[in-house]
Amino acid sequence: MTKINSGATPKQVRQDLHPLVDFQQDGMPLDQLKELIDKTLMPHLMAYDDPAFQSMFNAYPPAEARLGAEIMHNTNQGVTNWQVSPGGAMLEEMAGKALCQLFGLAATADCTFMYSGTYANQQAVYLGIHRYAEQMGVDYVNQGLAAFPDPKRLVVLVSADAHFSMRHAIRMLGLGEQNLIKIGLDSDRRIDLDALKSILSELKGKKEVVCAVATSGTTSTGSIDPIKPMAELLPKHVWFHIDGAYGYAYKLVPECTHLFDGDGLADSITWDPHKQMGAPIPNSVLFCKDGADFGRMSLYSGYFNREEDTEPNPGLKSPPTTRPMSALPLVTILKGKGLKTIVEELAQPVRGMRQMADWLRSQSDFEVCHRPDTGILCFRFLKPGLSAEESSRYQRKLYDAVMASGKRSISTTVLDGQTVLRFAVVKPETKFEHLRQSAEAIRLISGQMNQ
């Protein structure tokens, strides 16, 4: 079996890369520079296109994406507004509307391209605070959190398995982590609706919920929170956000569509096309149910993004003044492959992971930790006689041994304080058989460790 990465230690990688960052007065011919990169860097990159890569959400860009990326990089277009790139600005505007239609969002919906899901989540929370300030009649734009009579009352609700970017968001927006309230989970690791009801009742009159977040595809287990029931429980003033950075693409898969019921009720949705679609990074999207809500982000200047301009200005919807033409590689993927192929490719990891869960349940030395909603599955290898703490350490040893081989890539996560093994697949090329081979490799490694 060929290696999908070198398996080298950080020390070894550092040593190999040193010649590449040892800058000299004289330059290097391009052919020699390429040779140096091939020798020093390339062996240590991860082969995302190999079916044995089963650990994260990275995907190798397909030919259609590379076409769009080549044009994007060769022309180096900034697409913030009409002045810097008429075609680029218009393409982002039109692609955004087309994406809203593709996902069945309201006619009023719009989106903006962003550098990452982390920034998209942060902007969503900001929009929630900003709208609440307007409802309260306070000047959040000029005074910030000091505009509120008691900023400590402002809280954000998230799943206990929410992505850590929500912690980044409230830190950077000045709320502090004490104002991030985590909601307990049900047996499928989705937000427990009874727990949400209880929290809302407990907070009434004491705190002000400015934003609540449903995660559509948690990064640990891929679980999709109950969107519509959550929306129906939340007070009307609460900004309801869906962090679908990983999972929202699966709405397009017929057997998964029902899991996203109620997404049209959300005020905003995050999605990362650089995951399942293989769109070159950066490529993240923030949808708003009402495109007018992006107006809360708008800043104008005398030379750039002038208030009187009527042409498309994507830079008015989100902070980066310099933004790449990220819409183009996504457009070339969707247009080049066609929706039928896109949907079938999205469905493959879901089906493969469900088949893998069934197989693991039939094995006496494996334990499945949840029912997979998407392309993620968490599990344990069972070794008799170990305490919970010892079992956690054992899973980590198995993971370390798998990764050191360089032949396949899996991952770990922590569920309820216990370390578990984890498969995460976004590529259609990775089938059930590849996952089963990884499980057999884990079993073999365990046997070798016990000898």
Image: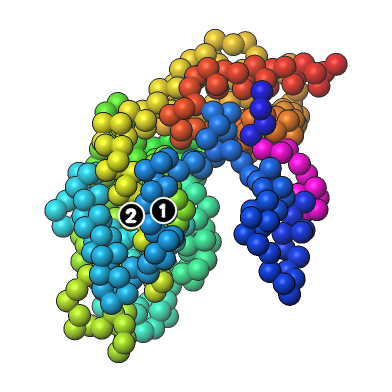
Does residue 13 belong to the magenta stretch?
yes
Vertical order, 166 against 363 (above or below): below
Seen from the viewer's position, the closer of residues 69 and 274 is 69
- Residue tagged by mark 1? 69
Q: Secondary structure at mark 1?
A: helix
Marks 2 and 1: in contact by CB < 8 Å?
yes
- Work out which residue is located at the far right of the displayed protein and give it: 451
**Residue kind at label 2, given as amino acid type:** Leu
Q: Residues within 10 Å of mark 2 (few under 14, many from 20)?
A: many
Left or right: 273 as drawn, with respect to 335: right
Left or right: 22 as drawn, with respect to 153: right
Residue under the point 75% across and 20% down = 446
For marks 1 and 2, the one nearer the N-term is 1
Q: Quadrant of residue 247?
A: top left
Q: Residues within 10 Å of mark 1 (few under 14, many from 20)?
A: many
> What quarter of the picture does the N terminus occupy?
top right
Residue 343 in view: yes
- Work out which residue is located at the far left of the displayed protein and give it: 107
Residue segment shown in magenta: 5-15
Cα distance, mark 1 to mark 2?
Answer: 7 Å
- Residue tagged by mark 2? 328
Left or right: 53 as drawn, with respect to 85: right
- Give the number of marks: 2
